[in-house]
């Protein structure tokens, strides 16, 4: 008798509680969709981080080399290297993101993040090199003018020497 009462209660319970298969299915679909969106976002973040790292590796050596051996066309060379590296990594990122079926706006947004990262990295390197200019100039001055070329002794810079040179 008890088992029969429980069986009848189970049949009655869904109808009384307002439970329906359609509501549960809709809820389940929302949960799955949310989960898939979070996995896609995590994968896109991973791919973006991977592209940033590859861009940094691509740009680091050429930018540092250009800043160490400064030539008159430094800015042209920097822009050229940065442009090529950004275009290459942007294409790679776009190809990898194409598999996710993202909108063009989202892909463009991630592309912009990658480009800002590359520009920021190059800017940091240029500013770091600019901060070192003073010490490099002092080292170069010391190497060229600190010692007398004929005797090898250290030169003494005095006001009389400076006045004599000015006259």
Image: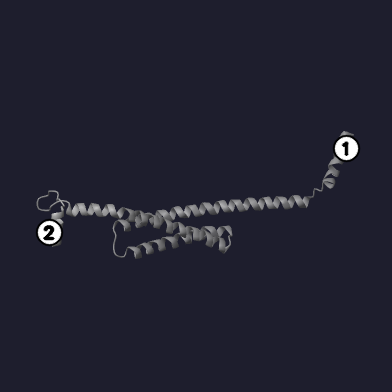
Q: Residues within 10 Å of mark 2 (few under 14, many from 20)?
A: few
Q: Secondary structure at mark 2?
A: helix
Q: Residue at x 12, y 59 (%)?
A: 164
For residue 166, side relative to residue 52 (left or right): left
Q: Residue at x 54, y 54 (%)?
A: 44
Residue that protrudes farthest toward the top in the picture? 2
Q: Position of residue 129 (x, y in %)?
A: 33, 55
Q: How is the image coloured?
A: one colour
Marks 1 and 2 in Cβ contact (< 8 Å) = no
For residue 42, side relative to residue 155 (left or right): right
Q: Position of residue 51 (x, y in %)?
A: 47, 55
Q: Secondary structure at mark 1?
A: helix
Q: Position of residue 77 (x, y in %)?
A: 34, 63
The quarter in which the N terminus is drawn is top right
Q: Say which quarter of the image contains residue 89.
A: bottom left
- Residue in front for this viewpoint, 158 or 117: 158
- Kindly identify which residue carries mark 1: 5
- Kindly identify which residue carries mark 2: 164
Instruction: Tell me which numbered mark, 1 or 2, is placed earlier along the sequence.
Output: 1
Please, is residue 25 above or below residue 71 in the view?
above
Q: Position of residue 85 (x, y in %)?
A: 41, 60
Q: Residue at x 32, y 63 (%)?
A: 74
Q: Nearer the viewer, mark 1 or mark 2?
A: 2
The quarter in which the C terminus is drawn is bottom left
Q: Residues within 10 Å of mark 1 (few under 14, many from 20)?
A: few
For residue 46, side relative to residue 130 (left or right): right
- Residue in front for this viewpoint, 143 or 89: 143
Q: CA distance from mark 1 to mark 2?
A: 119 Å
Say which mark, if any, is on residue 85: none
Residue that protrudes farthest toward the right in the picture? 1
So how many labels did they put on this image? 2
Q: Residue at x 17, y 51 (%)?
A: 146
């Amino acid at each position: 008798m008890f088992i029969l009462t429980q069986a009848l209660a189970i049949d009655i319970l869904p109808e009384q509680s307002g439970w329906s298969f359609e509501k549960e299915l809709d809820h389940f679909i929302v949960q799955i969709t949310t989960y898939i969106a979070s996995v896609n976002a995590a994968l896109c973040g991973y791919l973006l981080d991977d592209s940033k790292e590859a861009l940094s590796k691509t740009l680091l050596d050429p930018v540092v080399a250009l800043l160490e051996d400064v030539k008159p066309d430094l800015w042209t060379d920097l822009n050229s290297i940065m442009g090529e590296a950004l275009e290459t990594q942007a294409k790679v990122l776009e190809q990898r993101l194409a598999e996710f079926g993202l909108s063009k706006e989202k892909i463009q947004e991630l592309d912009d993040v990658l480009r800002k990262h590359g520009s920021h990295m190059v800017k940091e390197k240029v500013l770091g090199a600019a901060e070192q200019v003073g010490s490099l100039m002092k080292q170069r001055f010391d190497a060229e003018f600190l010692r007398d070329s004929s005797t090898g002794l250290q030169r003494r810079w005095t006001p009389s020497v400076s006045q004599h040179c000015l006259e």
